[in-house]
Amino acid sequence: MEICALAAFSFWGFHIDQGRITKILFGIGTPLLIAIFWGTFISPKATFPVTVPVRIVLQFIIFALAAAALYFSDKSLLAFIFGVVVLIEMILMYSVVDNPNSN
């Protein structure tokens, strides 16, 4: 999901209605900034790890912004599919709780 989000931000950046330099800056810069943010706060080996509830909120914001980037790049069906897959993945990932009493 993270790689797809970075690709969505890159696609959006390269498809904005601006000059070539701006497209390059947004097409490369936006995913780079998101990747740095992800590695700093959200990744399993984050420099500054956050609590699980904060991580869930941050992931949701980044994925929602990625879906919005696809939507505003005239890829509304892809944005919808991405959003649904992200929701399913996050629900499954965070609903599985390690129960110490289970075998």
Image (cartoon, rainbow, N blue to C red):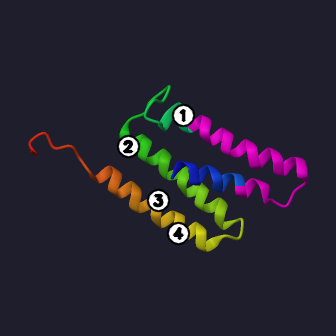
Stretch in magenta: 11-37
Tag in front: 3 or 2? 3
- Numbered label tally: 4
Are the two marked residues, 3 and 4, in contact with CB atoms closer than 8 angstroms? no
Q: Which residue is mark 1?
A: 39
Q: Which residue is mark 2?
A: 53
Dot 4 falls on a residue whose secondary structure is helix
Dot 3 or dot 4, earlier in sequence: 4
* Residue 27 covered by magenta stretch: yes
Residue under the point 66% across and 59% down: 69
Residue identifier under label 4: 81
Rendered location of residue 64, percent (x, y): 55, 57
Local packing at callout 1 (Cα closer than 10 Å; few below 14, some 14-19, many 20+) is some
Q: Earlier in the sequence, mark 3 or mark 1?
A: 1
Residue under the point 72% across and 65% down: 73
- Asked which secondary structure carries label 3, the reply is helix
In the drawing, what numbered circle is on residue 86? Answer: 3
In primary-sequence order, the first of circles 4 and 2 is 2
Q: Give the amino acid at mark 2.
A: Pro
User: Given the image, on which type of amino acid does mark 1 rest?
Assistant: Gly
How far from the left and from the top, in percent, is residue 30?
A: 70, 45
At label 4, the amino acid type is Ile
